[in-house]
Image (cartoon, coloured by chain):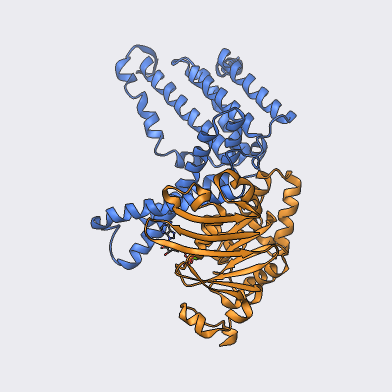
Chain colours: A blue, B orange
Amino acid sequence: MSQNIERSIRDLREMDTLASGDSPLHKVSAGVKLLVTVVYILVVVSFDKFNMSGLMFMLLYPALLFAVSGIPVSTCFYKLRFVLPLVCAVGIFNPILDRTPAFEIGSFVVTTGMISMITLLMKGVFCLMASFLLVASTRIEALCAVLRKIHVPSMLVTLLLLTFRYAAVLAEEANVMTQAYSLRAPGQKGIHYKAWGSFLGQLLLRSIDRADELYSSMLLRGYHGEFYYAQAGGGSIRDVLYAVFWCALFIAARCVNFTQLLGTSVMR
Amino acid sequence: MIRFENVTFAYEKGKPVLSGVSFAIGEGETVGLIGANGAGKSTVMKLLLGLAGPGAGNKGVSGTAEGKILVDGEEVSPRNLTQIRRKLGFVLQNSDNQMFMPTVWEDMLFGLLNYGMPQQEAEQRAGQVLKELGQEKLKGLYNHKISGGEKRMAAVATVLAMDPEVLLMDEPTSALDPYNRRIIINTIRKLPCTKVITSHDLDMIYDTCGRVILLSEGRIAADGPAETILRDRDLLEANRMELPLRFQ
Ligand SMILES: Nc1ncnc2c1ncn2[C@@H]1O[C@H](COP(=O)(O)OP(=O)(O)OP(=O)(O)O)[C@@H](O)[C@H]1O
Ligand SMILES: [Mg+2]
């Protein structure tokens, strides 16, 4: 149990560590990255559900970003391990509901239902990867700063920031408490059910206290819902080029099937 | 600079933590606030900062207070809290709760940037403070990957970077090794600002403070020169404390 909690603390902290990296991607301003991510997701989602080959091209974006940023792809899939099955489950009934044959590979009939399932799956995974890349290459404070800039209410943004920080505090407290418990209950696996009530109550109180003190500590140093310390940035030529390049490419890819184009020109 | 006028405070109704506390601390004075565990030392600091009592709105978890608390002639209240807090620097008893940014360096910049200092100037200031404290190695480190004592030094650094008019330190030397403890003592002695320091480390108090206020169960048991109070064995022992080691 204690090990589980420790792992989730590491998970949370690791996002911080990833986000404070120093690659070209990290240097792109948060606002531009947010914009490109949103456009990417919109374009990916808008693809026709049978247009698998066209969608394939959109893999270029996450693939390139993973390569440039040095963020390991494995970390992405490891962190998303709980969400991925859900995404996969979404299209699971398509092959059963839609059995119109599309084409044959040998004697195996591929139905349009299968294609739409795979397309849906790809859409889900692509969007998750893009969101992950955004969070893993951008500091939470910088993201909050951008949200403030586009006039998301400061209440909501503070809430987001504190949730992010509170999760770590909660996990740390849980860790300390399970360690303290197991030191005084040798040979016990986990926590005895009789202690659950007081354990949870105590955990809640302690982490609220700590979160409260942390928040006071922010207030004492002048925090009032604005993020002067995180540069929302934006406006450098490089940032503009980055945004224009990707958005143009996404939209072009939506209109022209590059995968097919590439395929036919190679064949010729 | 700081004034408590007949302050009575209770976190929970009917259980006063401070009763009828009055004292005044002048500009540039360094005062040691001592007393047994639970005497109310941290509470005095929270009241000053508006983390409890009138400054926090005097309701709910913030407890109920009577009397007046003044900082630089202004009464601590929700209305002028921002100005008052700007003047105060607070080193928390528990450094874990003080640092909230991923790295020590960002934590140091946080306050400066919030108060509108330009990035470059803030970095210069923070770098200088780390150097003065001999803690340059902390600069790139993550807050969750440093030891308890290092965290304490980092917490002190974040507060000193703000260059406060009044420095409130709750147990600044707990968890520190002798070398870092000495650095803190020397730093306190060098700083010209008003300082209020609580500690059970009476040798440190003797080294840094000219005046001592002794709290006992929420009342002031003694208030006077460190030289007299810290040498008074009977007074200290009556209040669950001992003479500083050097006088034993
Ligand atoms: N949030 C709170 N709610 C209720 N009671 C509290 C709260 N914080 C402190 N107290 C009570 O107030 C009293 C004084 O606490 P305080 O933290 O000021 O003591 P202290 O002098 O700083 O002690 P220490 O030397 O242990 O740090 C304690 O008896 C404690 O039980
Ligand atoms: Mg205390």
Residue B16 shown left or right of residue A55 in the figure: left
Residue visible at 49% across and 53% down in the picture: B53
Residue visible at 55% across and 34% down in the picture: A154
Q: How many numbered badges does the structure rendering display?
A: 0
The furthest residue to the left: A194
Q: Position of residue B180 (x, y in %)?
A: 63, 70
Pick the quarter of the image with the C terminus of chain A: top right
Query: Along the line of sight, which residue is nearer the eye, A92 or B54?
Result: B54
Q: Position of residue A6 (x, y in %)?
A: 43, 54
Residue visible at 47% across and 60% down in the picture: B8
Query: Along the line of sight, which residue is nearer the eye, A41 or B138?
Result: B138
Quarter residue A179 falls in: bottom left
Pick the quarter of the image with the N terminus of chain A: bottom left
Residue visible at 57% across and 81% down in the picture: B244
Query: Along the line of sight, which residue is nearer the eye, B162 or A175?
Result: B162
Q: Is residue B167 above or below residue B81?
A: below
Quarter residue B129 falls in: bottom right
Q: Position of residue A167 (x, y in %)?
A: 45, 46
Residue B87 visible (yes or no): yes
Q: Position of residue B46 (x, y in %)?
A: 52, 57
Residue A171 visible (yes or no): no
The furthest residue to the bottom: B248
Q: Is residue A37 above or below residue B103?
A: above
Quarter residue B208 falls in: bottom right
Query: Along the line of sight, which residue is nearer the eye, B247 or A21?
Result: B247
